[in-house]
Amino acid sequence: MKRLHTAICALTMVTCSLAAFADKSDQVERLNNAKSVLDEIMATPDKAIPNSILSNAYCVIVIPSMKKAAFVVGGQYGRGVATCRNTPSGKWSAPIMIKLEGGSFGFQIGGQSTDLVLVGMNARSGQDMLKNKFKIGGDAAASAGPVGRNAQAGTDWKLGAEFLTWSRSKGLFAGIDLNGDVLSQSDSDTRELYGVNVPFETILKGQQAAPKEAMPFLRTVSKYFRAAQ
């Protein structure tokens, strides 16, 4: 009986470990997909994020393969990762896991999968990222971002837009209007990535070491989003 009890305990521990790994694998895959999205976008200079934006970014959010479907009433939903630059060091924080939800209404039928990139352009964007959730265009001003390595952003972001937004669908990378969509933090996904409950503020302010699985994504962000000299 004692041996049986020991065997059951051991089996339970193995099962829990495998389950935890399986859960974490979803977040690791999302981090790797986010890295690939940035690499692929920046590999085409004529359609990439402009240098002036890369060097002034406070936060970077990547949502790979956001789902959108519609039949009269439409909706969209995606999960992604976010990191914010810490001042004065300029280093990027460990990532948090986020989700973006929105809806639309109209005569529309169809569905598609879209990659999204949101770039926070000032200190207010970092403060918004510390909130549990906020509405783009409502709680946080946003504008569709320009494309082209040497393109110049309009005056909107300098005057008040906290986020610039882009989408990529079927190979086309262009600015997008996400006003009305709600960006929120995913407690469960972040907990599964780190293995414990870590406050989002602790992570985004650079007080939490990034898990090794997140390093490829963070190195890619650091590579492209270099601080202005």
Image (cartoon, rainbow, N blue to C red):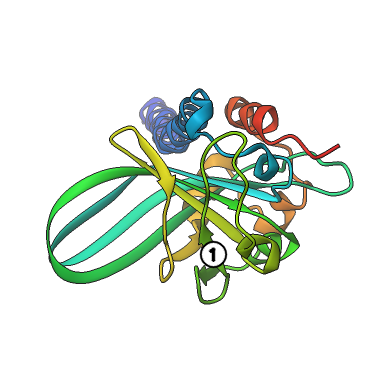
Is 219 left or right of 146, judged from the image as shown?
Answer: right
From the viewer's perspective, is residue 225 above or below residue 183?
above
Label 1 CA crowd tier, 10 Å (few <14, some 14–19, many 20+): many
From the viewer's perspective, is residue 102 above or below residue 197?
below
Callout 1 amino acid: Ala
- Counting from the top left corner in percent of width and height, residue 41 is at 48, 31
Residue extending farthest to the bottom is: 138
Is 43 left or right of 18, judged from the image as shown?
Answer: right
Check disc 1 and report the residue beneath it: 142
Seen from the viewer's position, the closer of residues 130 and 46 is 46
Residue drawn at (64%, 66%), measured in percent from left and top? Answer: 128
- Counting from the top left corner in percent of width and height, residue 5 is at 39, 33
Q: Quadrant of the rendered structure where residue 208 is?
A: top right
Seen from the viewer's position, the closer of residues 49 and 65 is 49
| Local secondary structure at mark 1 | strand
Seen from the viewer's position, the closer of residues 192 and 102 is 102
From the viewer's perspective, is residue 222 above or below residue 56?
above
- Counting from the top left corner in percent of width and height, residue 152 is at 62, 46
Q: Quadrant of the rendered structure where residue 95 is?
A: top right
Quarter of the rendering occupied by the C terminus: top right
On the question of residue 120 being in view, the answer is yes
- Counting from the top left corner in percent of width and height, residue 35 is at 52, 30
Is 149 left or right of 98, judged from the image as shown?
Answer: right
What is the count of numbered marks? Answer: 1
Residue drawn at (60%, 57%), measured in percent from left and top? Answer: 154
From the viewer's perspective, is residue 109 above or below residue 212?
below
Residue drawn at (52%, 47%), measured in percent from left and top? Answer: 146
Quarter of the rendering occupied by the N terminus: top left
On the question of residue 129 being in view, the answer is no
